[in-house]
Image (spheres, rainbow, N blue to C red):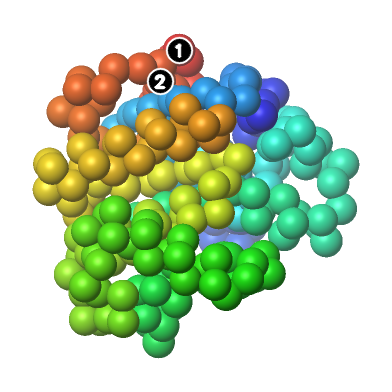
């Protein structure tokens, strides 16, 4: 499902000439289909950069990466958007479309996939009800609180039942009951076969739901499992 082999990542150059240091170094691990992993480590350890490679926003500068059975260094760039559509992502900064309602933000991946409008209406309404936003279907992001926007972003990421779900600090704007309900959703998706990776600083949540973890420190993988 996900395989990293001696992967390194660096961003551009420093002062126009000097090569920038690697933000991730010699990352090697493999995840089977249907795995659940916490992604842990202090701020600056490289968690967000690792997730970016998993959803193909950036590509490794060295090493070998395989996602959803595709060898990325052998996959044509024009084929990457189709692969990305099988990956659900919950971003720290939500990335909602400000001019669309909560309903339309969540419906967007289904419309791109060509689903019938009747099915979209039923699925989106049910999921937004489940995350506690049944009365906010027509609200646009500026009209929602941070926690409400986070729940819309989560609903958008899971509405298509992705093969791989990546969540970057998904509980940062949620209170404890909402965070627990989110974990129930992630665990149910995982039970149905979705591979789930959750980056978090919420030690309470990790303690309540113990499981295998990828742990980063200063750009290196220091624990896996």
Q: Mark 1–mark 2 contact, CB under 8 Å? A: yes
Left or right, 76 with respect to 12, comes to right
Quarter of the picture containing the C terminus is top left
- Choose between 165 and 108: the one closer to the eye: 108
Residue at the bottom extreme? 99
Is residue 193 depicted above or below 148 in this figure?
A: above
Left or right, 145 with respect to 155, comes to left
* Residue at image point 33% right, 29% down: 41
| Picture coordinates of residue 11, whole percent (x, y) | 58, 51
Query: Badge 2 is on which residue?
Result: 213
Left or right, 47 with respect to 85, comes to left
Query: Can the viewer see residue 26 in this picture?
Result: no
The 10 Å Cα crowd at callout 2, few under 14, some 14 to 19, many 20 or more, is some
Q: Secondary structure at mark 1?
A: loop
Is residue 60 depicted above or below 29 in this figure?
A: below
* Gap in angstroms between the C-alphas marked 1 and 2: 5 Å
Query: Badge 1 is on which residue?
Result: 225
Q: Quadrant of residue 216?
A: top left
* Residue at image point 66% right, 29% down: 1
- Choose between 144 and 26: the one closer to the eye: 144
* Residue at image point 61% right, 40% down: 163
Query: Can the viewer see residue 74 in this picture?
Result: yes
| Picture coordinates of residue 114, whole percent (x, y) | 68, 69
The 10 Å Cα crowd at callout 1, few under 14, some 14 to 19, many 20 or more, is few
């Amino acid at each position: 499902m996900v395989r990293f082999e001696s992967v390194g990542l660096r961003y551009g150059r420093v002062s126009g000439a000097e090569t920038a240091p690697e933000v991730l170094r010699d990352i090697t691990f493999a995840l089977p289909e249907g795995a659940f992993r916490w992604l842990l480590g202090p701020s600056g350890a490289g968690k967000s950069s690792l997730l970016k490679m998993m959803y193909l926003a950036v590509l490794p500068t060295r090493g070998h990466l395989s996602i959803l059975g595709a060898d990325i260094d052998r996959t044509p760039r024009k084929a990457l958007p189709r692969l990305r559509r099988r990956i659900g992502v919950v971003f720290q900064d939500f990335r909602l479309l400000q001019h669309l309602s909560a309903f339309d933000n969540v419906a967007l991946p289904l419309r791109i996939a060509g689903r019938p409008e009747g099915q979209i209406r039923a699925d989106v309404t049910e999921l937004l009800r489940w995350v506690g936003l049944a009365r906010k279907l027509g609200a646009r992001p500026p009209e929602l609180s941070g926690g409400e926007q986070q729940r819309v972003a989560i609903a958008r990421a899971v509405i298509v039942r992705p093969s791989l779900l990546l969540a970057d600090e998904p509980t940062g704007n949620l209170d404890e009951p909402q965070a627990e309900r989110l974990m129930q959703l992630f665990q149910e998706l995982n039970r149905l076969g979705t591979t789930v990776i959750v980056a978090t600083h919420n030690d309470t949540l990790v303690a309540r739901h113990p499981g295998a973890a990828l742990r980063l420190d200063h750009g290196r993988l220091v624990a896996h499992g």
